[in-house]
Image (cartoon, helix red, strand yellow):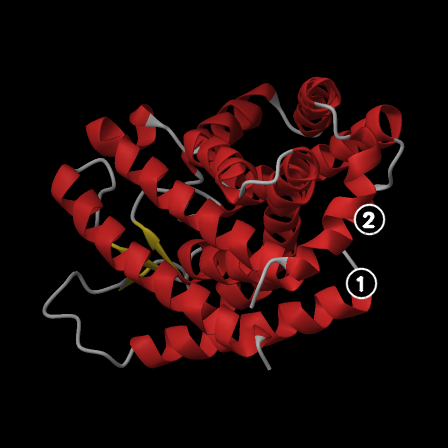
Amino acid sequence: MSYAPYEGLVAPARASAHPARLLVGSALTLLLFLGFGFVYSRLHRALVTPETWAGIIDESANGSSAAGVLINLYLFVPLIAALGIAMALVHGRRIAGLIGPPRLALVQFRKVAVAIILLMAALTLVPTGGGPEPVLNMAPGRWLLLLPLGLAGLVIQTGAEELVFRGYLQSQLAARFRHPAIWLGVPAAAFGLLHLDPVMHGADSWLVVIWACGFGLAAGDLTARSGTLGPAIALHLVNNLGAVLIAAPEGIFDGLALYVYPLSLGDGGGLTSWLALDLMMLACSWLAARLVLRR
């Protein structure tokens, strides 16, 4: 597959592809998101007592409860709204144009999601060599009750990030610069740096950044080869589904997870082993997505 299908997403961006517009659009998106996020926070605070709110703040910091995870996931609704306004004001475009043809995007999303889910299911049958075993984190009945809210939140979160990084930033750069090293590399690097968190991940938090950069390159490549955001959203959603709702590292955004792994991402050894496995899974998922998109 070539990058020829990407022209459908890049062409509408050319009329407003000047770097100054991209900078203004990005800054406006950030400012609006901060403003909307403040309102989002105040609305939640108005619904509970000060003591309850203090507990929610602590739980939201690392996603240690179901409420904390859901608050984090639905915070991306304001980001979508902010990007939509910035797109209209700065670029004269609708946010839906970042996705590509809706029907094609949905078909590609379904193909890639099914392929990666089947791949993950197959890999669970492979012996792990005595690694840490998952431990039940939540009663299955309660998990099933919360599953629809968690799935909807993940769709919002992953969709918002793909709209910003692959839909907006990557396509605007591709409309201005021809070399993929720029329009693939810059959004991937920005996405990676967004995951830098020494407080949560410890001294080796750069390993998480490396993984996120790799993910950004894979998602960007799939977007360019398919001509829609469908495959990138599918890759992102299935990845986060496994890491947030199925089995999460213990103590790290595990409030909605059915299982947890007794693995600290703040520990260098644990983080290194996690990175190696996740990079392998990412590469396999990317290859599976490319394979089904050829059909």
Dot 1: element: helix
At 10% from the left edge and 68% from the top edge, which residue is drawn? 130
Residue linked to disc 2: 96
Q: Using a 10 Å C-alpha cutoff, classify the residue at mark 2 as few (fewer than 14 neighbours), some (14 to 19) or many (20 or more).
A: few
What x and y, as percent, mark residue 293?
A: 58, 73
The answer to which of 288 and 68 lies nearer the viewer is 288
Residue linked to disc 1: 102
What x and y, as percent, mark residue 134?
A: 26, 63
At 78% from the left edge and 39% from the top edge, which residue is drawn? 13
What x and y, as percent, mark residue 111?
A: 60, 76
Amino acid carrying mark 1 in the image = Pro
Q: Earlier in the sequence, mark 1 or mark 2?
A: 2
The mark total stands at: 2
The answer to the question of whether label 1 and label 2 lie on touching residues, with beta carbons closer than 8 A, is yes
The answer to which of 226 and 48 lies nearer the viewer is 226
The answer to which of 83 and 179 lies nearer the viewer is 179
Dot 2: element: helix
The answer to which of 158 and 100 lies nearer the viewer is 100
Residue 227 appears in the picture as rendered:
no
Q: Using a 10 Å C-alpha cutoff, classify the residue at mark 1 as few (fewer than 14 neighbours), some (14 to 19) or many (20 or more).
A: some
Does 80 sit left or right of 2 as displayed?
right
Q: What is the quadrant of residue 4 in the picture? A: bottom right
Q: Is residue 265 above or below residue 151?
A: above
**Quick one: quadrant of the C terminus?**
bottom right
Amino acid carrying mark 2 in the image = Ala
What x and y, as percent, mark residue 144?
A: 54, 68
Residue 210 appears in the picture as rendered:
yes
Q: Is residue 88 above or below residue 133?
A: above
